Amino acid sequence: MSCALITGITGQDGLYLSELLLQKGYDVYGLIRGQNNPKAGLVAETVPDVRVLAGDLTDLSSVLRALQISQPDEVYNLGAISFVAYSWKQAALTSDVTGKGVLNILEAVRIYAGSDLSKVRFYQASSSEMFGKAQQAPQSESTLLWPRSPYGVAKVFGHYMTINYRESYGMHASSGMLFNHESPRRGIEFVTRKVSRGVAAIKLGLLDTLVMGNLEARRDWGYAGDYVDAMWRMLQQPEGDDYVVATGETHSVRDLLKTAFEVVGIENWQDYVEHDPALLRPAEVDALVGDSSKARQKLGWAPTVSFPELVRMMVESDLEHMQARQVETSRLGINGR
Ligand code: NAP
Ligand code: F7E
């Protein structure tokens, strides 16, 4: 039986990846930070077979201890401060967790594996945010990196550090340059989930208007369940490598709104949307679209959920949850910054 250690287990991808690996018969360990993490309950409920270990990416010895206890064949580093807008508010912390945290875990793996580095395979959650002010379209593994946020800069550090450990020590280390991927489990701070919850709340009469930032930004949005499968496929290859994972389609936030409101039968969506300049970012990533030919050819990977299907899945899930929970308007907190 193979064994995996996942950081970021309480996040969207951590939950999907745990489910995938458990299904494949893996022993799965997950790193959880904090002495009383409120999301620990969600992990226990969703993936009860995951064994939880305490640790924080900023604390190398805690990561080393987790490796020593779990003795993993595969390590998936998904832990990060991942909300781009927040990364300007806590730039130093984002650098410590999302950037230097990668070095900590790489170093912990190196120390743990000792003279037999081939016994552990490592996955780093790199991001399309690294392309930032994209210098070509679509973006591939060889496109120049030009990050536009403290988050993007931290991810570039982690990306190159992963490559450096592969090249310096021969570590089986892979970097997944994943484009935006979403699901009903997406954090409520991200635009797709903000829109799916907002539209559901408007449909149910719990909210009057949705307050948004830049509607012209374009993203290549896929389904998270598909993307964790690509992570696993990377670690089954004979060598570590870097792969772009994307659908190859791009849509604006405006398209997202229109598609989401259509799910609940609202055509005049503009009447329900307001603009707040405070939601604009100090520097924006205007447009992203990925070229995932390498992942498709080498990993045999392909996305299975289209953009309209993804939006429908998210809106319907939020409608169902809100109806079931009879959420009070004041507790929705959808329009906050
Ligand atoms: P997410 O839902 O925001 O989850 C992030 C996870 O990181 C949470 O479990 C969080 O734990 C954990 N974390 C935060 N600080 C930590 C620390 N100091 N030590 C250990 N763990 C810490 O993110 P996601 O969407 O699942 O994404 C997974 C990874 O892929 C992230 O690295 C993200 O940057 C990257 N990525 C995501 C996308 C995307 O579109 N989803 C695209 C490209 C790359 P708490 O619950 O304790 O906060
Ligand atoms: O923003 C615009 C916003 O926060 C998408 C993370 O998973 O994917 C994610 O980063 C776009 C941006 O995701 C609102 O300005 C407009 O242009 O959903 P987002 P992101 O910044 O693309 C990458 C690949 C990651 O790696 C990250 O970890 O939508 N936008 N109005 C808005 N965004 C938000 N959040 N809220 C708004 O009201």
Image (tube, helix red, strand yellow):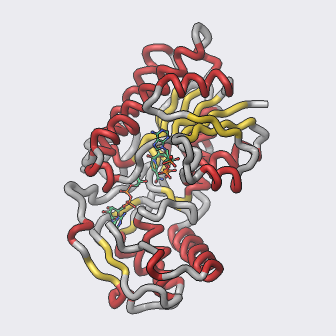
Residue 334 in which image quadrant: bottom left
- Evaluate whether residue 272 shows in this view: yes
Q: Quadrant of the C terminus?
A: bottom left
Of all residues shown, which one is farthest toward the top? 115
Examine the rendered structure and indicate whether residue 43 appears above or below residue 50: below
- Evaluate whether residue 144 shows in this view: no
Front-lying residue, 115 or 35: 35
Front-lying residue, 77 or 251: 77
Where is residue 151 drawn, in percent x and y? Answer: 33, 45
Residue 291 falls left or right of residue 43: left
Residue 86 falls left or right of residue 12: left
Residue 299 in which image quadrant: top right
Of all residues shown, which one is farthest toward the front? 35
Q: Quadrant of the N terminus?
A: top right
Q: How many marks?
A: 0
Where is residue 24 drawn, in percent x and y? Answer: 76, 42
Where is residue 71 drawn, in percent x and y? Answer: 68, 23
Examine the rendered structure and indicate whether residue 56 appears above or below residue 264: above
Front-lying residue, 213 or 169: 213
Q: Residue at x 59, y 23 (%)?
A: 65
Residue 310 falls left or right of residue 276: right
Examine the rendered structure and indicate whether residue 287 appears above or below residue 325: above
Ligand 2, seen in the image, is in the quarter at bottom left
Q: Residue at x 55, y 29 (%)?
A: 122
Q: Residue at x 38, y 53 (%)?
A: 83
Where is residue 257 drawn, in percent x and y? Answer: 40, 77
Q: Residue at x 59, y 82 (%)?
A: 326
Examine the rendered structure and indicate whether residue 79 appears above or below residue 280: above
